[in-house]
Image: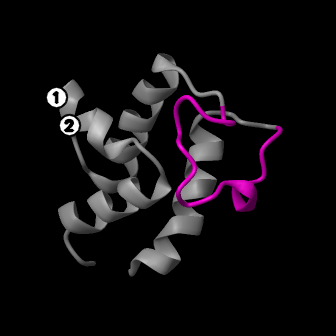
């Protein structure tokens, strides 16, 4: 999987995991801040994103500082997923 095909999948997963019923995944910009921006995500949502990474991609984030660097936007998350998962 490449980054271009991963981003729409990841956006859908974010909407699903965070139960963002009023947000269309296609409306989330790749560089839109996940926290402090229009999405209105909070610390509970960050835990759900960590769960998403573990369940969907087998990536465990145990260091909060690392999580803050990864959960910036869809671009950062997708790059991290591709760098830290084994090809199928």
- Stretch in magenta: 22-39
Specify the quadrant of the image occupied by residue 46: top left
Vertically, is 88 above or below 75?
below
Q: Which percent across, then down, holds residue 26?
A: 72, 62
- Mark carried by residue 63: 1
Depth check: give the residue in front, 88 or 85: 85
Question: At 52% across and 58% down in the image, what residue appears?
Answer: 10
Question: At 83% across and 38% down in the image, what residue appears?
Answer: 22
Q: How is the image coloured?
A: one colour
How many numbered circles are shown?
2
Q: Which percent across, then down, holds residue 70?
A: 31, 45
Mark 1 secondary-structure assignment: loop
Mark 2 secondary-structure assignment: helix
Question: At 16% across and 28% down in the image, what residue appears?
Answer: 63
- Is-magenta flag for residue 65? no
Quarter of the figure with the N terminus: bottom left
Q: Which percent across, then down, holds residue 60?
A: 21, 40
Q: Gap in Å between the C-alphas at discs 1 and 2?
A: 5 Å
Quarter of the figure with the C terminus: bottom left
- The residue under label 2 is 66
Q: Which percent across, then down, holds residue 68?
A: 31, 34
- The reply to whether discs 1 and 2 touch (Cβ–Cβ < 8 Å) is yes
Vertically, is 55 above or below 26?
above
Specify the quadrant of the image occupied by residue 50: top left
Specify the quadrant of the image occupied by residue 2: bottom left
Question: At 47% across and 49% down in the image, what residue appears?
Answer: 73
Q: Is residue 14 left or right of residue 56?
A: right
Tell me which secondary structure the magenta stretch mostly adopts: loop
Q: Is residue 83 left or right of residue 8?
A: left
């Amino acid at each position: 999987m490449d980054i271009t095909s991963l981003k729409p999948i990841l956006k859908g997963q974010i909407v699903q995991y965070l139960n963002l019923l009023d947000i269309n995944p296609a409306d989330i910009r790749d560089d839109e801040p996940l926290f402090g921006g229009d999405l209105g995500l909070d610390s509970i949502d960050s835990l759900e994103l960590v769960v998403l990474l573990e369940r969907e991609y087998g990536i465990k984030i145990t260091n909060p500082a690392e999580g803050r660097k990864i959960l910036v936007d869809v671009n950062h998350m997708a790059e991290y997923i591709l760098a830290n998962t084994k090809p199928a």
